């Protein structure tokens, strides 16, 4: 089992939706988190991308120099970066980190942010770009020269002059709940990521993905993305979860949900559907809390409970086929220690990666 953490390059905090308790993620703080993950046995860390984040490639390169074993899962957004440039960047960082690069292929779900990066394509068109991007990608890493004429991408006689450490290329991670996303994942992706939804919903997504993958003659690993709020007792954990919303008002929730309405992401819509913008009944499954989704975009659920309960939920997802977890908690430095100290010993056979 792989257990990754999250490096908050957009800032960190003890509370959601407020500048109170806000931490600036300067170099020293990012290095603290990376050093902790390196020592505690996490497989690696996800670095986010977007207009409010530090650049994930640059951050990963800087942190690779001060760590030894952890891996860096960084985003590649087809349509916002040229495939040949992305491939050369991948080779360089994989070589300089001695094979510690993982790639998160994303299409983006916020039309406003996408427009800011010059992408004006609709939902399914972006997945068509991703399909072409990964087709060329695989040709490049197969040795090239790559020649491709598609609707969105055209390259001629291009090759990579240096090989990556990881063969044939660093593993490709990917998330998406729409039929278009499932199709791309089945054809190209090594590890499919789903948000932490109620297990019965996750089971349906996994079954659908596997049907697509079988049709392509492939197998795809499964991963789950979740926040975690773990304490010595369940009561303490729920108190800590509610405390994160201390400064969140109903107006703030309404404003956040209004912004999410512009997203064309099916996965984001599934997160919103779990709470409907209401504080009522946020526990959508035993120890699965949708409170983060009231104010945050992206992953809106958290596994909340005692160490035994959190481990039980993780193993429940594992029983569905997940062998990778990307976890996070606020603030990320302290919670990385808390999860490692409380939860890791309760994962059967866990010895770190």
Image (tube, rainbow, N blue to C red):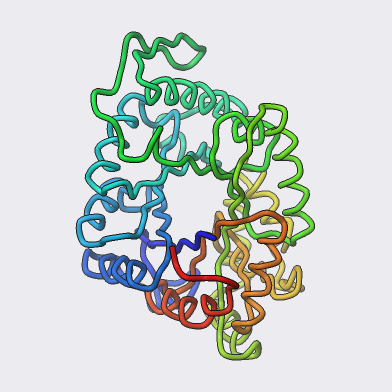
Say which residue appears at 32% left-offset and 46% top-offset: 99
On the rendered structure, is 216 left or right of 249?
right
Residue drawn at point x = 30 percent, y = 42 percent: 94
**In the figure, is residue 68 to the left or right of 125?**
left
Relative to residue 34, is residue 160 depicted above or below?
A: above
State how many labels appear.
0
- Quarter the N terminus occupies: bottom right
Q: With 26 as the anchor, is 268 left or right in this view?
A: right
Residue 266 appears at what percent x and percent y? 67, 43
> Where in the figure is residue 260, as x and y percent of width and height?
60, 51
In the displayed structure, would residue 234 be above or below residue 198?
below
Depth check, front residue: 122 or 187: 187
* Quarter-of-image position of residue 285: bottom right
Residue at 49% across, 22% down: 135
134 over 301 or under it: above or below: above
Which residue is at 75% across, 60% downward?
199
Rendered-image quadrant of the C terminus: bottom left
Residue 235 position, x and y percent, is: 65, 90
Quarter residue 306 falls in: bottom right
- Picture quadrant where residue 301 is located: bottom right
């Amino acid at each position: 089992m792989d257990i990754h953490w999250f490096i908050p390059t957009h800032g960190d905090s003890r509370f959601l939706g407020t500048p109170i308790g806000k931490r600036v993620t300067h170099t020293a703080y990012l290095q603290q988190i990376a050093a902790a993950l390196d020592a505690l046995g996490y497989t690696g860390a996800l670095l986010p991308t977007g207009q409010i984040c530090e650049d994930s490639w640059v951050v990963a390169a800087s942190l690779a120099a001060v760590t030894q074993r952890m891996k860096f899962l960084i985003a590649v957004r087809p349509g916002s970066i040229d495939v040949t440039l992305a491939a050369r960047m991948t080779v360089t960082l994989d070589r300089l980190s001695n094979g510690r690069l993982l790639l998160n292929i994303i299409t983006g779900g916020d039309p406003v942010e996408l427009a800011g990066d010059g992408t004006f394509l609709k939902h399914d068109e972006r997945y068509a770009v991703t399909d072409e991007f990964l087709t060329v990608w695989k040709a490049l890493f197969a040795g090239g020269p790559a020649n491709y004429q598609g609707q969105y991408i055209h390259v001629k006689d291009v090759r990579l002059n240096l090989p990556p450490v990881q063969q044939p290329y660093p593993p490709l991670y990917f998330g998406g709940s729409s039929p278009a996303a499932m199709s791309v994942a089945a054809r190209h992706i090594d590890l499919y990521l789903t948000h932490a939804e109620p297990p019965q919903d996750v089971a349906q997504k996994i079954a659908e993905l596997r049907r697509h993958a079988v049709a392509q003659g492939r197998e795809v690993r499964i991963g789950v993305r979740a926040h975690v709020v773990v304490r010595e007792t369940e009561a303490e954990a729920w108190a800590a979860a509610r405390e994160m919303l201390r400064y969140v008002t109903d107006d703030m929730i309404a404003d956040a949900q209004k912004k999410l309405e512009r997203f064309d992401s099916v996965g984001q819509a599934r997160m919103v559907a779990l709470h409907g913008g209401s504080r009522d009944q946020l526990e959508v499954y035993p120890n699965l809390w949708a409170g983060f989704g009231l104010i945050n975009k992206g992953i809106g659920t958290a596994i909340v409970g005692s160490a035994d309960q959190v481990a039980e939920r993780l193993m429940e997802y594992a029983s569905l086929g997940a062998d990778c977890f990307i976890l996070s908690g606020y603030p990320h430095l302290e919670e990385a220690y808390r999860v490692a100290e409380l939860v890791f010993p309760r994962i059967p056979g866990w010895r770190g990666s």
